[in-house]
Each structure stands twice: as C-alpha cells, then as structure tokens.
Amino acid sequence: MHTSKYDIASLELTDEYLTDPLLMALAWKKAHSYIRTTNWYADNFELDKSSLLLSEKCVQWAREIRDVAPLTPLQLVPAPKSCEWTFKKPKGNKKPCLIWQPKSTDELSLRPLAHISIQEQTYFTLLLMCLANQVETKQGNPATEYEQVHEKGVVNYGNRLYCIYDDDGHAEHNFGATTIYSKYFTDYRKFLERPYYFAQQQVTEKLPDEEVYLVELDLKQFFDKIDRVKLVERIKAFKPSELNTDASSAVDNLLARFDNWQWKSGTDKAYPVCRTEEVKTPPKGIPQGLVAGGFLSNIYMLEFDEQLQKVLGKDLSNSMQEWIEETQPDFQDLDYASFKLIDYCRYVDDMRLVVIGPRSRAGLSFKDLRKH
C-alpha cells in the first residue's frame, strides 16, 4: 500500500493525513473493533465485507473523502433507554415460550440511535485521530489527582481517549491500537468522587453562616441538540493556521458533508416513537452511534468547560442577583455576592458543581440552585 511520509505521533487536521490510505486503514481497524464490541445493532455482514480487499478499499476511500457528494444517509434505530427488563409468559400460548420485554411500558421512551456505514465511521474515526493529541492535551490528564485538577485545568471525564501523558501534560494516543476511549469505570468513578472531595474541604473551612451546596445538572438530549454549525467551526479551529484559508480542502469538504448529513428517506414516518417535546423531528446533532461522536461532543463543550474554569473561586454575584430579584423574592435578604463556585466537573452530559454560599433562614434548596 502506497503512503506518504509523515510523523504519526504528531498528526494534524490536514489533507495529507486525512487522505492517507495507511491512516485510513488504522481508522478502519479502530472503528471496526469498536462497532463490533459496542454497537449491538451493528451490521456484521457489512463489517465482514469491508475487510475484503481492505488495501484497495482504503485507497478508494482516501480518494472519495475529497468528494462533495452527500454522506450515506443515517438509518434510524429506535432503542429503549436504561430500564428494568423481565421475562413474561404470553397469554393463551400453551407452548413453553417466554417474551423478554421492559418490565413497565407505561413511560417507556426510545432513543434515536443511528446505524452508520463503515465507510463514514472510518472517515470520522480518522478525523478523531488527526485531532486526538491536541484535544486530549487541552483537556488534561483525567487521572490527575484532585489536588492538582484546578491547576492543570481538568474538568471533563467523559468520552476521554485512551492516552499516555508525559510530564508536561502532552497527550499521546496510540494510533495503532484498537482501543479508542479510556475505560468507563475508571473515569466515571473519578467524576463521581470529585465533588465530594471539594465539598468535604469546604465543610471544614466554611464560616458558621455559610453552607456548601452540591449541584447536579443534566443536559437533556445532549447529542441530539448539538449545533452542527458551531461544532464544525470549533473543529476547524484546530486546523493549522496556514490552512484555515483553504476552502476547498478534503477537511472542509468532509465537515460540510457532516453538517448536511441527512437521515434515510422515510425516517419521518418511523421517528414518532422517539419524538419528544424538545426534539420533534429527526435530530440534526451528533448521530448517536458514531464511533467518534463522544470525542466530537467534547470538542463542542471545550469552550463551555473553559468558561466555567475561569470563574472557579469567584463569586456569582451578577447572575445570582438578577435571578433572585426576578424569581425568588423570599431570598432578597441573601448576600448573593458571596456565592462562589468551588469546583465544576463533567461526564458527557452530567455536571457537578460545588458552590459555597450563605445559609438562608428561608432555606435555599438544591432545587432553587438547579433552576439558577
């Protein structure tokens, strides 16, 4: 297989890397392994076929990634969210047959997962590879001890890529391995324990008339609501500066095709089972089922994470004053200028904030803080 010369440890978002057949093969390897082990609705026959004549396919895909033709349409896969399942004996059936179904279907909601062809999965996995070291370095090592997370700028623990970090905090992703993301149980445990670490610190340091609040937030239908236009802009910001003026590159063409990625014809008829008040039509965010989806969502949230890091240890006076005056007249006597954000961390769409503020005689509840 012919390939250009490059420094694989220092990949960048350039046409040279994005159209390289060897890197395309490595991206296929990663996507192929992830889909087989994670996406229960995967088309295994399609995956098997893609392994035939892989060398020729990667050369072809590297050429086709420059196209402006639409990406293969997304196929809707309605799937239930986490709920308790049980075996139930069907009525009037004398045969020894059991039906496996959700224990309660009264409030059963379905998520709009997407089946995505292996070619498109490979494209965006290669995009992930080109950005991996830059994005993960920017987010910091998730294994950082709590005593140093504020200094190192670590707030996100969700969908982190599996990387090795040097003493200067530079991340290096293993491009040849099949492992893409860091282990769930390790990062999620760090996320859950972190707010209690900082809350416990403040309990021993706070004044008698202060209280420590632990606020839990969730971004509802996070992936479905992501603005593709803004995401594309934030991805392009990682392009080498000398290439930002190139409007006809393979990178720009791929991102433009992503922005216009459509669902398969007829999806509107099947979507009502997934419909919600917030997302009434097939979503145009990050497709749930895209191997690189979690990584792309972190790029989307980078600016938000950085803004919250800037106010750590500072009071929330301006926004707090406006909110109290408009919605909480009972709390007018509060010294809202003394509300401070002690810590913030995130795992995908779940957030935890540790806030210290005055103890109110009226009783400022977690619910009130969540509204703010």
Image (cartoon, rainbow, N blue to C red):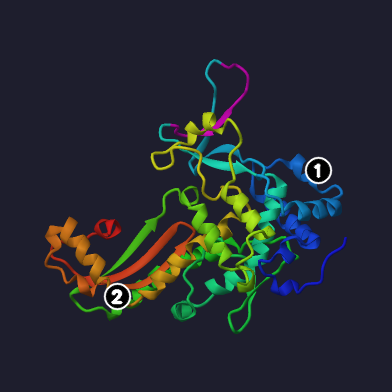
Amino acid on which the number 2 mark rests in the picture: Val
Along the line of sight, the residue nearer the viewer: 254 or 162: 254
Q: Is residue 98 magenta?
A: yes
Q: Nearer the viewer, mark 1 or mark 2?
A: 1
Give the percent coordinates (x, y) of residue 368.
24, 57
Q: Image quarter for residue 181?
A: bottom right
Give the vertical position of 319 relative to 279 (above or below).
below
Query: In this orientation, does residue 134 appear?
Result: yes
What secondary structure is the magenta-colored segment mainly? loop
Please provide the residue range marked out in magenta: 93-105
The structure residue drawn at horizontal position 71% and vertical position 50%, both measured from the top left corner, is 67
The structure residue drawn at horizontal position 54% and vertical position 30%, both measured from the top left corner, is 270
Amino acid on which the number 1 mark rests in the picture: Lys
Query: In this orientation, does residue 298 appear?
Result: no
Neighbour tally class for label 2: few under 14, some 14-19, many 20 plus, Cα within 10 Å: some
**Which residue is the extreme one toward the bottom?**
167
The structure residue drawn at horizontal position 58% and vertical position 80%, both measured from the top left corner, is 169
The residue pinned by badge 1 equals: 49
Along the line of sight, the residue nearer the viewer: 162 or 55: 55
Along the line of sight, the residue nearer the viewer: 150 or 61: 61
Label whose residue precedes the other's in the sequence (1 or 2):
1
Give the percent coordinates (x, y) of residue 152.
49, 79
State the count of labels: 2
Neighbour tally class for label 1: few under 14, some 14-19, many 20 plus, Cα within 10 Å: few
Give the vertical position of 335 relative to 82 (above or below).
below
Along the line of sight, the residue nearer the viewer: 288 or 157: 288
User: In the drawing, does residue 114 fall left or right of residue 362?
Assistant: right
The numbered dot on residue 203 is 2
The numbered dot on residue 178 is none
Q: Is residue 67 magenta?
A: no
